[in-house]
Image (cartoon, coloured by chain):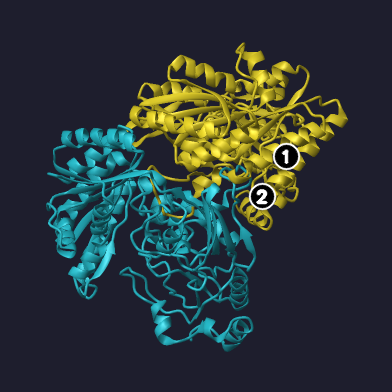
Chain colours: A cyan, B yellow
Amino acid sequence: MNTLDNSLIDKLKEFLTDHQVTTNKTILEQHGKDESYHGSSSPDLVVFPESADEVSAIVKVADEHNTPIIPFGLGTSLEGHIIPYDHGITIDFSLMNKVLEVREKDFLVKVQPGVTRSMLNKELKKYGLFFTVDPGADATLGGMAATNASGTTSVKYGVMRDQVRDLEVVLADGEIIHTGNLAQKSSSGYNLNSLMVGSEGTLGCITELTLKVYGIPEHIVAARASFETVGDAVEAVVSILQAGIPIARVELVDELSMTQVNLFNDTNYREKPTLFLEFHGNEAGLKSDVEFTKEIVSDHRCEEIYFEEDNAARNKLWEARHNLAYAYVHGNPGKKLMVTDVCVPISELAGAIQYARSQVEKLELNGGILGHVGDGNYHVLLMIDMNDAEEVKKADQFNEQIVEYALQRNGTCTGEHGVGVGKMKYQHQEHGRALQVMEKIKLALDPKEILNPHKLVHMKRRNR
Amino acid sequence: MNTLDNSLIDKLKEFLTDHQVTTNKTILEQHGKDESYHGSSSPDLVVFPESADEVSAIVKVADEHNTPIIPFGLGTSLEGHIIPYDHGITIDFSLMNKVLEVREKDFLVKVQPGVTRSMLNKELKKYGLFFTVDPGADATLGGMAATNASGTTSVKYGVMRDQVRDLEVVLADGEIIHTGNLAQKSSSGYNLNSLMVGSEGTLGCITELTLKVYGIPEHIVAARASFETVGDAVEAVVSILQAGIPIARVELVDELSMTQVNLFNDTNYREKPTLFLEFHGNEAGLKSDVEFTKEIVSDHRCEEIYFEEDNAARNKLWEARHNLAYAYVHGNPGKKLMVTDVCVPISELAGAIQYARSQVEKLELNGGILGHVGDGNYHVLLMIDMNDAEEVKKADQFNEQIVEYALQRNGTCTGEHGVGVGKMKYQHQEHGRALQVMEKIKLALDPKEILNPHKLVHMKRRNR
């Protein structure tokens, strides 16, 4: 116990049961790390609230005691977002895991923050609906909103921010607010939905989400297309987008990563730069889109393209792509995964990926490239031995190089993983004077800086 | 001159030419009213900057003199947004009207705030691109961003907020920031794009916008379908949406308004509740969508449906719909237009429109209904004699009734027109404690409240 006194625990136990408050060392440690390479640090205490009122009461106690609060979903973040470097109280939302309401006619669903995307999709399937955002990991929806997650489908359906119609949020003083409403459009007041989405727990704790859902498409076609070079593959995607073909997913997996895919999934796909594609629509429309796509990829030296309309075959294809990060981790025991996450304007993507590939080779790092190329967002998966200071240094240097490249071209240091602690050092360069606006907002809404301190924006160290 | 001293004008003239600063009475009066029924009030001064640096210098002078700043596009707002009730300096952006850059491959365009949507679309046509947001009026893009405008196409392409990739904004202290970047996705820092869009000039002056554009669709089909009742028409739309048919526009025009359409446009459309529809896509896909739509509307007692594939016929159809507000104004000389703007969850729309119709009749008001029904947003166009106190009172009462109805069903008091002065009285009821968050943000970013004071959020009167 570093920062907590016993009176704080006593106060919490006035409204929480013994099972809802723990200082068990194993549980503390579980809440001290995420899926990234960032160093761990345990909270003093983990609480498991069951309602917004309990969250509000917890935050009020923390406020009185000037103690940090860290909201925690499932710990799948990739930039250390949930690591309590200042210790304090981690709020674990796993007991708030109910799908509260499905509003079919409104294409809306109301959920608690601990619901994961697979839990939600299981429930929605009964209604012929689905939730679009798919970051790979089976993250909680609260966590996905906190980091503005996205993934393979955002080229068609948008990112997490585009799905949020309303949030219930507990503020730093324990007040409970709603940031939106259930209407499809609103020009009423400042847009707090979008401010809270991506604020990484630094402005409030999300205790309920109303999210947009979609009808399961009438028809889906998936495809896998391999190319001679990464440049060809990226140029093909640009041409597909310019042709106005409404692709629902388009993922690039490079040569090295295809080898990992084959090893881990027992497939024998061609080990060449490959696009995984998916098209949603009506049958007649898709047929025309597919024909057009074939023409376009062949103009870009596509070596082979396979289409899968069958559900099981399609799932197998996407599973292979989805398992890629795990394939790397599995294939490199003892090493940690460092994933870069820059995003650039599409016109700059081919150059950015070629630059990244050349720097990986120059620095003799071990890393594959995959990308949500329809969005201009790509990842380099680096497997790092954290005990090898030289390797860690080279990986950091690499990350800096590609961020620099992206920012010079009006891109961003993080397309979908968020800032956490890992991307804080780039915030000034990326946002310039706008960073001061962010700091002013943080200060106005959390003057004591108790909400996930030292994440996202650099503030003066708060008084203890 | 109420609030200005001569030293302020002298300071402005240090960096602005005589043509860029005016106290001409006619020009002041032109900047003292918008297209709404709200009372007019003139600024003390109108300035016409040509660059962000000039805007910054103007705001710095205003800051020193504690003088209000009102950003002004073309004055097409509908809730008094640009009326300077505290007088001060109106910044007219009409000289900042250049399309700066078309980034074809990135589907982005960079414009100055005084560019209107028709100017932009004229330029984009050369590239086979178009800008989607269409609020009816040929507003400036700066103004449209300031109010988060939308319109007939938002059911498919989203509202203004969805199009903004980056803004250059001059803050209350004259600092110039960028709120975003050119990448399609970003999880870096608080989302200032969405905060600035819809902030109605109360947080900063927009001096440049980077906006998303789309390829002109391969194929477009428009349709006009008439129904026995408004309820039938709305239910048909709900069914079309549930079927997953990707309509690009769907507008409802009621019986009364169809009469105005015919009178003004010299058409002889059936004077029944009518849907104007539009479909964008590839030819094969649209054929299938159109057939499906025919089936659905016939299930909802559609009396007749006409399709128009020809460009000229399609334009004529939409022109009739677009001219509706002007048709009312034209047909009611001497009266002022009061347009309501509530938006409700789609499942509540049929009930909301029926309620509105019954209240219009009960209060014996003169008003037609039209709506962006795909979004749950509808307008009642009331023609009011502002000299008839009883009629004004009844119109206000009606507005309150339908706002109340919408808020009780988790809707919003304004779907697309914004708050301005007209919707301020509903902000507390709509946002509850979230309004305090908005006030804190306003105070943090504009502590002297010089930016469009007394709009959007109620603040304590600033010190003079």
Q: Please give the label number shown on residue B409.
A: 2
Q: Do labels 1 and 2 share a chain?
A: yes
Of marks 1 and 2, the one in the foreground: 1
The residue lying at 48 percent from left, 41 percent from top is B162
Residue toward you, A348 or B284: B284
Q: Please give the label number shown on residue B60.
A: none
Mark 2: few/some/many CA within 10 Å (<14, 14-19, 20+): some
The amino acid type, in three-letter code, at marker 1 is Tyr
Q: Can residue A457 be seen from the camera position used here?
A: no
Q: In this view, does B209 lie to the left or right of B449?
A: left
Residue toward you, B461 or B296: B296
The residue lying at 52 percent from left, 16 percent from top is B316
Q: In this view, does B318 lie to the left or right of B343?
A: left
Residue toward you, B401 or A413: B401
The amino acid type, in three-letter code, at marker 2 is Arg
Protein chain holding label 1:
B
User: Is the residue under label 2 in contact with that under label 1 (CB below 8 Å)?
Assistant: no
Find numbered disc 1 in the image and state the secondary structure of the residue it sits on.
helix
Protein chain holding label 2:
B
Q: Can residue B236 be seen from the camera position used here?
A: yes
Q: Is residue B381 above or below residue A259?
A: above
Residue at image mark 1: B355
Residue toward you, A245 or B19: A245
Residue A25: image quadrant is bottom left
x then y, percent, for residue A113: 50, 65
Residue B70: image quadrant is top right
x then y, percent, for residue B288: 38, 32
x then y, percent, for residue A204: 55, 64
Q: Earlier in the sequence, mark 1 or mark 2?
A: 1
Mark 1: few/some/many CA within 10 Å (<14, 14-19, 20+): some
